[in-house]
């Protein structure tokens, strides 16, 4: 679909990963205080510098075809006639990063404005050099960046075959100011998920809820097919790029659904590849897993 642009997308992701990695290893200092934005999320020097590194490459894309939109820097985002929108979160997981953690990722999603869907996605993990990618015509695959090079043979991925039981891991994003759940609802949702796992076995075998601080990494790990990594819930709407990873899960053989809270409090299902249409993203390795997680969300927003 974007054969002629794939190299630029990859180069932009790698450029951002290189900047983030320098902060993670201490080559660049994290001492600068991060800015607290209006929605309660953070913005620091790493967000800006990694975004600028990607912009330097992506600005070579045809302006009549691609808008460029970044979470923390100004892009080329005022072109209503462009066919596609290139959404960039070049430091997904600022809070965990400023705390010294290494689970932050770089996300690039290409949104088709006519289809109203993400049609291509890249998630890079600076700490390991892994890059997950997929588009509507290509199955999810894993590449690796190392010292300026990408391995020539990407590895195709498939979601795991596990069930929602005591061996299962369900990923969630952390509660932040401005997101659609109250702290009480967020805690209730986590409890509901563990109870779903316990219902399939003994109470002590409840499912594990894991919060790594990056929605991009959560989605990539479900697509990666690790044992027990069966699904996740994105309760945040800090930006559409957080949801681009749904494409990774779907193209790895899993499924996803968007959930919208209607005015009367009811919850309706929406296209998971169109984050502008929903409040929550639920994704998993099977329809059964997603249905169970959707039920957990519905019980919390009644």
Image: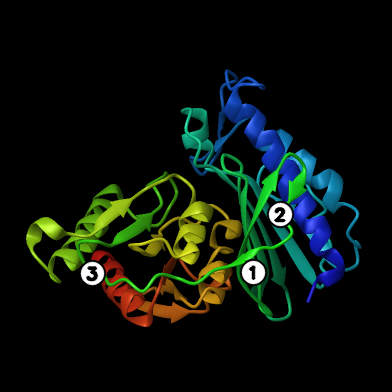
Instruction: Mark 3 or mark 1: name the one nearer the start of the chain.
Output: 1
Vertical arrangement, residue 99 with respect to residue 271, above or below: above
Give the percent coordinates (x, y) of residue 20: 64, 35
Q: Which residue is depicted at the point 40% across and 80% down? A: 268
User: Is the N terminus in the top left, top right, bottom left or bottom right quadrant?
Assistant: bottom right
Q: Is residue 108 left or right of residue 56?
A: left
Name the residue beneath numbered marker 2: 151
Quadrant in the rendering for residue 32: top right
Element on which disc 3 rests: helix
Dots 1, 2 in contact, CB < 8 A: no
Find the distance from the CA under tag 1 to the CA under tag 2.
16 Å
Spatial CA span between label 2 and label 3: 45 Å
Q: How many C-alpha atoms fall within 10 Å of the one at disc 3: few (<14), some, or many (≥20)?
A: few
Residue ID for mark 1 = 134
Front tag of 3 and 1: 1
In the rendered image, residue 173, in percent from the top left (x then y), is placed at 41, 51
Decide which of tag 2 and tag 3 comes sooner along the chain: 2
Foreground of the two, 52 or 276: 52
Residue at 54%, 42% in the rendered image: 104
Q: Residue at x 39, y 62 (%)?
A: 233
Is there a contact, CB below 8 Å, between mark 2 and mark 3? no
Label 1 element class: strand
Q: In the visual, does 191 lie left or right of 245?
A: left
Q: Is residue 67 or residue 168 the one in the foreground?
A: 168
Q: Which residue is mark 3?
A: 299
User: Can the viewer see residue 13?
Assistant: yes
Q: Earlier in the sequence, mark 1 or mark 2?
A: 1
Element type at mark 2: loop
Tell me where residue 15 appears, x and y as whole percent: 76, 43
Q: CA distance from mark 3 to mark 1?
A: 32 Å
């Amino acid at each position: 679909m974007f054969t002629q642009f794939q190299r630029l997308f990859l180069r932009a992701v790698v450029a951002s990963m290189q900047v983030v990695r320098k902060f993670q290893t201490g080559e660049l200092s994290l001492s600068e205080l991060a800015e607290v934005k209006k929605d309660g999320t953070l913005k620091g020097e790493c967000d800006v510098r990694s975004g600028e590194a990607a912009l330097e490459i992506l600005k070579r894309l045809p302006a009549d075809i691609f808008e460029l939109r970044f979470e923390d820097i100004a892009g080329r985002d005022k072109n209503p006639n462009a066919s596609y929108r290139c959404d960039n979160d070049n430091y997904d997981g600022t809070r965990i990063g400023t705390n010294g953690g290494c689970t932050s990722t770089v996300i690039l999603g290409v949104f088709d404005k006519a289809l109203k869907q993400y049609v291509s996605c890249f998630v890079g993990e600076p700490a390991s050099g892994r890059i997950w990618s997929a588009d509507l015509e290509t199955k999810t695959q894993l590449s690796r960046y190392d010292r300026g090079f990408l391995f020539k043979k990407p590895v195709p991925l498939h979601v795991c075959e596990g069930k929602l039981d005591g061996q299962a891991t369900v990923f969630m994003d952390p509660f932040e100011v401005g997101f659609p759940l109250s702290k009480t609802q967020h805690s209730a949702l986590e409890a509901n998920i563990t109870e779903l796992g316990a219902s399939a076995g003994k109470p002590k075998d409840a499912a594990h809820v894991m919060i790594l601080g990056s929605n991009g990494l959560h989605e990539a790990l479900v697509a990666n097919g690790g044992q027990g990594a069966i699904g996740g819930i994105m309760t945040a709407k800090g930006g559409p790029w957080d949801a681009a990873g749904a494409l990774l899960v779907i193209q790895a053989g899993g499924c996803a659904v968007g959930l919208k809270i209607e005015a009367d409090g009811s919850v309706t299902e929406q296209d998971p590849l169109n984050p502008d249409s929903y409040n929550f993203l639920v994704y998993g390795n099977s329809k059964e897993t997603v249905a169970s997680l959707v039920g957990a969300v519905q019980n919390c927003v009644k």
